Amino acid sequence: MVKPFVPQLVYVEPQALEYLLGRELVSKFESMGIEIRQTTSHNQIRNLPGENHFQKYRMAKSTLVIGLRKTLKFDTSKPSAEYAIPLATGCMGHCHYCYLQTTMGSKPYIRTYVNVDEIFDAAEEYMKERAPEITRFEASCTSDIVGLDHLTHSLKRAIEFFGQSEYGKLRFVTKFAHVDHLLDAKHNGKTRFRFSVNDDYIIKYFEPGTSRLHERIEAAAKVAEAGYPLGFIVAPIYLHDGWKSGYHEMFEKLEATLPAIAKKDLTFEMIQHRFTKPAKRVIQENYPMTKLELDESKRKWKWGRYGIGKYVYTSEEQEDIKDTLGGYIHRYFPEAKIEYFT
């Protein structure tokens, strides 16, 4: 079982100590005997311990920076929500294929923002602008927020904030099973709690440092019992020897473990594995021994947003993925909704 994240090193922006959460976190880490350093800005962390890139990268992944979110203009989100709500940046997981590796570049350390009320005030403005339409906020565009929340409880506060809002909904996705502190949150059905799931082969070889499949599914069952609407992101869908039986087993385990209540309002999102040339370079630098197949000649080229093209599976392979996984979903979860395949 993956233990809940505890940083090896903590940096704090001086202004963060003007907020209750900042002071609470610093005193928590002091009492745990963790080294705390000052930094002028959460964007300026230098001199991380380590002899080489490999060591510094791993140290960064276990470094937490306590700071303020100064930009309160929210990015527009992915297909699943209108806006990204920025509670944290960075992740303690070591997923070889992760897009955050290229977007975060030289800053793979984890940042948590303590000016949570100001972030909620900004969210309130976005909701007012669109009212009476519902505005959905995604809390996991730049981090795995659940992996950090046992320390900060910012996500729990966000769940309760949206729970009492008139026109807001929250959603996030996680690969971690550390959900117990979120089960009694007053969510009022306004937060969709999603888990990223994959077959055992992919979790074993490409998702080190995250909860195993059976742990995620058990956590999903608890979340459903707590009344949250539930969803699963099957991502990245990766073709390997035996992938059809691997995914079949995954759906069987899901069906066997989830309570009946979860199956009434269940969503699936499906994302095939893709990579860009810059991502391939970074992945091979950070995980030189990876088994991840990154051969451009076996893929189809697709123009991405912002002019960066990506390598995806061929059209035939994509049809096969859609038919196979879509078939499993219809068989085991006939009432579920497939939100998209990309």
Image: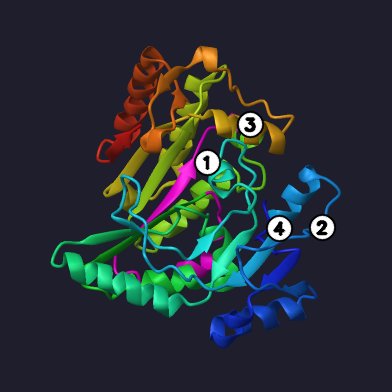
- SS at circle 4: loop
Real-space CA distance between mark 4 and mark 3, rounded to the nearest whole angstrom: 22 Å
Q: Residues within 10 Å of mark 4 (few under 14, many from 20)?
A: some
| Residue at numbered disc 2 | 49
Is residue 222 or residue 68 the one in the foreground? Answer: 68
- SS at circle 1: loop
Question: Going 34% across and 18% down the picture, which residue do you hit?
Answer: 319
| Residue at numbered disc 4 | 62
**First along the sequence among labels 4 and 1:** 4
Identity, as a three-letter code, of the amino acid under mark 1: Tyr
Real-space CA distance between mark 1 and mark 3, rounded to the nearest whole angstrom: 12 Å
| Residue at numbered disc 1 | 99
- SS at circle 3: helix
**First along the sequence among labels 1 and 2:** 2
Identity, as a three-letter code, of the amino acid under mark 2: Pro
**First along the sequence among labels 2 and 4:** 2
* Quadrant location, the C terminus: top left
Real-space CA distance between mark 4 and mark 1, rounded to the nearest whole angstrom: 18 Å
Real-space CA distance between mark 2 and mark 3, rounded to the nearest whole angstrom: 23 Å
**First along the sequence among labels 1 and 3:** 1
Q: Residue furthest right?
A: 51
Q: Are marks 4 and 3 in contact (CB under 8 Å)?
A: no
Q: Report the span colored magenta.
A: 175-201
Question: Going 39% across and 60% down the picture, which residue do you hit?
Answer: 225
Mark 2 or mark 4, whichever is nearer to me = 2
Identity, as a three-letter code, of the amino acid under mark 3: Arg
Real-space CA distance between mark 2 and mark 4, rounded to the nearest whole angstrom: 11 Å
Magenta-drawn stretch contains 317:
no
Magenta-drawn stretch contains 199:
yes
| Residue at numbered disc 3 | 281
**First along the sequence among labels 4 and 3:** 4
